[in-house]
Amino acid sequence: MTKKYPLPPFTEETAKQKVQLAEDAWNSKDPIKVSEAYSIKTIWRNRNQFINGREEVQAFLKDKWKNELDYKLKKELWLYNDYRIAVRFEYEYHNAAGQWFRAYGNENWEFDDNGLMAKRYASINDLEIEESERRL
């Protein structure tokens, strides 16, 4: 079975590593690379969508980055315990019409023994911004 290091139980150091690895993967905008951090049967809630399994994750991400152009993400560790990590994040992108957005939110992650994310629950809000207001 595939293992995705660092493995639980998490320490502050390994939780921060897991968050940074997730940020780096998402900023690659590579749906395959990102999906490899999730279990085959991962369960997601992303805004109002429910996504089940790695294949659905890949399809979701492929569609996301077709619509969220010049995407850039920053994640920050909020809390952690042995098998769970909570993060806050913000990301910026623009749509095809050129309107920029900053999205804010939080995610709750639960990992299996192999370090793969089994559950991801994300709450996200978008704010229209001017290009001159970008921070990322």
Image (cartoon, rainbow, N blue to C red):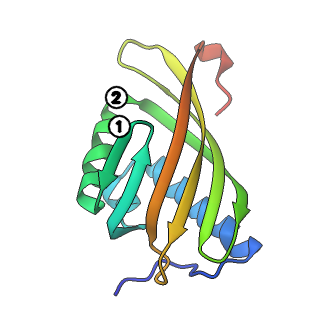
Q: Which residue is mark 1?
A: 64
Provide the secondary structure element on which disc 2 rests.
Answer: helix
Q: Which residue is mark 2?
A: 67
- Residue shown at the point (47%, 51%) measured from the top left: 26
Q: Position of residue 1 (x, y in %)?
A: 34, 87
Residue 78: which quarter of the image?
bottom right
**Relative to residue 69, is residue 42 depicted above or below?**
below
* Quadrant position of the C terminus in the picture: top right
Q: Are marks 1 and 2 in contact (CB under 8 Å)?
A: yes
Position of residue 94 in the picture relative to residue 81 (left or right):
left
- Residue shown at the point (60%, 12%) measured from the top left: 130
- Circle 2 residues within 10 Å: few <14, some 14–19, many ≥20: some
Q: Position of residue 102 (x, y in %)?
A: 58, 26
Residue type marked 2 = Asn
Q: Residue furthest bottom?
A: 1
- Circle 1 residues within 10 Å: few <14, some 14–19, many ≥20: some
Position of residue 26 in the picture relative to residue 83 (left or right):
left
Residue 132: which quarter of the image?
top right
